[in-house]
Amino acid sequence: MKARLGIIGLAVMAAAGCLQKETGHTLYLSPDGMVSWLVLEKDVYSDTTDRAARSQEEQEYIVSAARDAHGIGRGLLRLDPTDLRTRIIRNERPFVVTTEARYRSVERLGRDLMARLGLDGDVTLLGEGPVMTLRVRLDVAAALASEKEREPDDPVDALVDDLDRYRIVLTEGRFTNARGFTLSADGTQAMFAKTPWEAIEANGGIVELTLSWPR
């Protein structure tokens, strides 16, 4: 069961379950806008005290992962990837699993993700001369004020995590401009910067993010 505390890019999804793990999300962004979403689930184990129940829960997880049917796999599949592959790196407790999905466009991926989460906003990818710019506009005030009708326990919910767990890596070149992101020293990686609520209020409840890079 999941409790929705906020929105992707600006909030956290909290899971009420017995499987414990560390999760990291890396989005490998190509200069043309194609993107590969890689999720690392590390040190996965059940904290259930009953040995039989613990074993069953862990086996259900690893068997599902082998079929791309675990939570992360099902969530990524809902966003219509061109390819998806799950690799079991460690096949014994605690498990280590990676799942990677490829998408033709970061613009469409962002829009589909927002739609699945019931969020108001838009994602655009524009080519202006030699520069590509990704723009994200999110109505945070509307998201916090109301809950849109959504599919119960939508698998996409499994993809929403703490902001600190996400990074965007440019596969070639360096990011040249960023708003709402912190760039690495070499400019190849972008991490979400948490926007103060006062700044969001001053902007009418809207959060705007941008990333630019050479084509």
Image: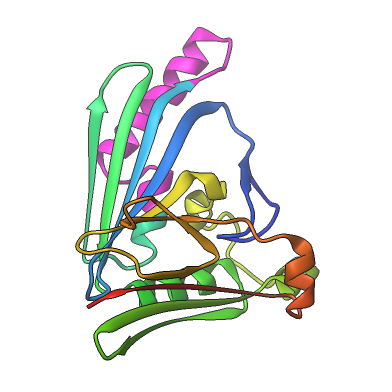
Q: Residue at x 68, y 58 (%)?
A: 6
The C terminus - image quarter: bottom left
Percent coordinates x, y for residue 51 in the rendering: 50, 8
Q: Name the colouring of the figure.
A: rainbow
Write the start and end of the magenta stretch as one range. 46-74
Q: Residue at x 42, y 25 (%)?
A: 44
By secondary structure, the bulk of the magenta-drawn segment is best described as helix
Q: Is residue 126 left or right of residue 137?
A: left
Percent coordinates x, y for residue 174 in the rendering: 28, 63
Name the residue nearer the viewer: 139 or 214. Answer: 214
Q: Residue furthest bottom?
A: 129
Name the residue nearer the viewer: 87 or 153. Answer: 87
Residue 202 seen from this side = yes
**Residue 127 found in image quarter:** bottom left
Q: Is residue 66 magenta?
A: yes
Residue 1 seen from this side = no
Percent coordinates x, y for residue 101 in the rendering: 27, 56
Q: Residue at x 24, y 85 (%)?
A: 130
Q: Residue furthest front?
A: 185
Looking at the image, is 31 positioned above or below residue 98? below
Q: How many numbered marks appear? A: 0
Q: Residue at x 36, y 16 (%)?
A: 93
Percent coordinates x, y for residue 78 in the rendering: 39, 63
The N terminus - image quarter: top right
Looking at the image, is 209 positioned above or below residue 186? below
